[in-house]
Amino acid sequence: MTQRIIAAMLAGMMAGTPAMVRAQQANPDGSFTLKVESNIVLTNVVVRDKKTGELVKGLKASDFTILENGKPQTVSTFDYQNVDAAAVLRESTTVSGKATVADLLNQNFAEKPSELKDHRLIVMFFDLSSMQPEDVDRAVEAAQDYIKKKMQPADLVALVSMDTSLSMDQDFTSDKDLLLKGVGRYNGSEGSGFANGNEGGDSSGTADDASSFTADDSEYNALNTDRELYAIREIAKSLERVDQRKSLLYFSGGLTRQGIENQASMRAATNEAVRANMAIYSVDARGLQALSPVGDASTGSLRGNAAYSGGAMQNQLNSNFSSQETLATLASDTGGKAFFDSNDFAPAFQQVQHDTEAYYILGFRSTNTARDGSYRHLTIRVNRSDVKLEYRPGYYAPADFKHQKAEDREEALMEQMRSSLPATDVAVYLEALYFRMSDNRFFVPVSLIVPGSQIPFLKNGDKDKANIDIMGQVKNAEGIVVGNVRDTVKLALDQSQQVERKNIQYTTGFTLAPGRYHLKFVVRENQTGAMGSFEADLQVPDLKKMPLKMSSIVLSSQRTPDTKKSTDPLVRDGLEWIPNVPHVFRQDQHLYFLYEIYDPTREKNGPAPPASPGLVRRPSGQVHVLTSIEFMRGGVKVYETPLVEADTVNTPDRGAVSFQFDVPLSQLKPGTYICQVNVIDDAGGSFSFPRMALMVRPAAPAAAPAKNSVASAR
């Protein structure tokens, strides 16, 4: 894979060129996406009598005082929820399968969203990827017991699971039969049991199973934890529009955090849960465990002397505590509770019902408008001394780009990569080509263009400096990622250069097999954090099915010295060809063409090629390939290059006849042209006449020779 950045002067605007796909600033149906940010903070408050523990009802907004970091806040929204006042809903048909977590987001769940008032919204999340079959059995039995015996008319329950992927198995419903049927699918056989791997690769205290090597699985554990935290975040995000308090019962076999490795995903999950007014009730489905210091019959004898020094027991205790600590943090930071070391899970369901029996929803807009990502403590008081309050102790403020940590910035890029909505703050243009490297292997160079006017440069001496982050991904027809790019590019330009008229071009490459692919690239400038994205489908052809096997056609106006002696097809005779993505040229430039013809037919009666030393067997017979390039305007041919004939394969390592053309554009008038490349395999009787559009603009003014300069870095 090659990666390079080019700051190149293009004389004209890139709009209006029909030869390439453009990044869409609007949705395909012509509508535009409106981004709205709401700064309101919601918190639930349960008010109970100090002596009896009974719920205190009838309070008003004026009875409450909210302090954020000791500063008073104004209550802007106020509501009271009481399950005793819940009305029976007339549900629409519930959905399962590939639906959103809550069908009520499309207002299909009830006739009116207001009908959700005074109901409990409970999501049961079964993390099958972290539980062993016996853990799943315990969780399912507890859920079935709750549904059969303790579920109340005001309870609306949804079922979500994660095995190989996150799945919404049952939308919110009060139908016990549907819920029992959904929960029963999890029982035993679906438990994947992805246990945590070995931390640090230390063999001491591990089972002696005849393997001489103990792998360090820290990175695997970090990725697995991120995966589970992302699932929680997606559940919370799908429920963000519902005002009522949501409760997530999270059944897990433990969740281990790797120091700062999972900090960004942990914060993202808790922030999204707080924003969605969703409390997490973590349940360790492993129940009460008896940890044996010397192991049990399910494993081999322990290595070393850890079993006799107490080290093995301490390692087990540390591992168990670590896997529970993350679950406890999720619960405490979102206003829920954690349930560990018990085989009776009924208290978890009782706690959810108890906490959501009746509560007040207070909303305020913080007077602290700084988006610094800091933790803000909440203090809530009532003008009565005979009550006690239960509420979330605080929340994390949103963070702008300047205050984001490195992990959060990386997470923002990943989030945009996963998002189905395009980022349009920075315009991005893309072109993908292909060249055959072997029978079933193609090199696909991908070039990105970002207008230089959208990159804020900082003054630093005699240079204007900036840097941009680039993330790219290639997926095959099955949606599997087959290629990744992650790069940070530093830019430095002379102040004398007109940056606003330059374009930043970045080129990378992938090696792919024939087939259909989907490309997505995300670009972020690192001064304000503005991002842009571009998505496109790519077809790498199966040339075996084509009578004339031909590569993409490269149009270029710049060729720079190749200092690293790359082997990719865009490097010829020590020069690297820079693809002109918008196909816009000036009259004072040269237009360079590059393309290849693969496996041309050889003449049967022609003279054999000269012998070569070694054991390589050379095919007999010459080839006869003819090619020329025509320029048409208004349907009339205005220029054609001389006809070029090739009788030898001049790129034998790829079995290709390579053609290069140099067309001075001074002989063409400014305007738009249709360019047709004529290729004829005379010996095989096959031909191809691909066309593309290009634009020629007037030559640059003589007073500005610096505009032709090129700054490049690889």
Image (cartoon, helix red, strand yellow):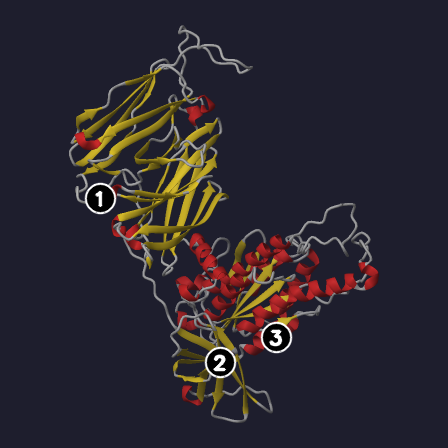
The quadrant holding residue 372 is bottom left
Q: Is residue 555 above or below residue 618?
A: below
Q: In the rendering, at what x and y percent does residue 202 appear?
A: 72, 54
Q: Is residue 314 above or below residue 556?
A: below
Q: Amino acid at mark 1?
A: Gly
Q: Quadrant of the C terminus?
A: top left
Callout 1 crowding tier (Cα within 10 Å): few <14, some 14–19, many ≥20: some
Q: Secondary structure at mark 2?
A: strand
Q: Is residue 345 in view from this perspective?
A: yes
Q: Which mark is residue 350?
A: 3
Q: Secondary structure at mark 3?
A: helix
Circle 2 or circle 1, nearest the eye: 1
Q: Residue at x 59, y 55 (%)?
A: 224
Callout 3 crowding tier (Cα within 10 Å): few <14, some 14–19, many ≥20: few
Q: In the rendering, at what x and y percent does residue 640 appear?
A: 21, 24
Say whether residue 104 is left or right of residue 671.
Answer: right
Q: Which mark is residue 529?
A: none
The quadrant holding residue 38 is bottom left
Mark 2 to mark 1 CA distance (whole Å): 56 Å
Q: Secondary structure at mark 1?
A: loop
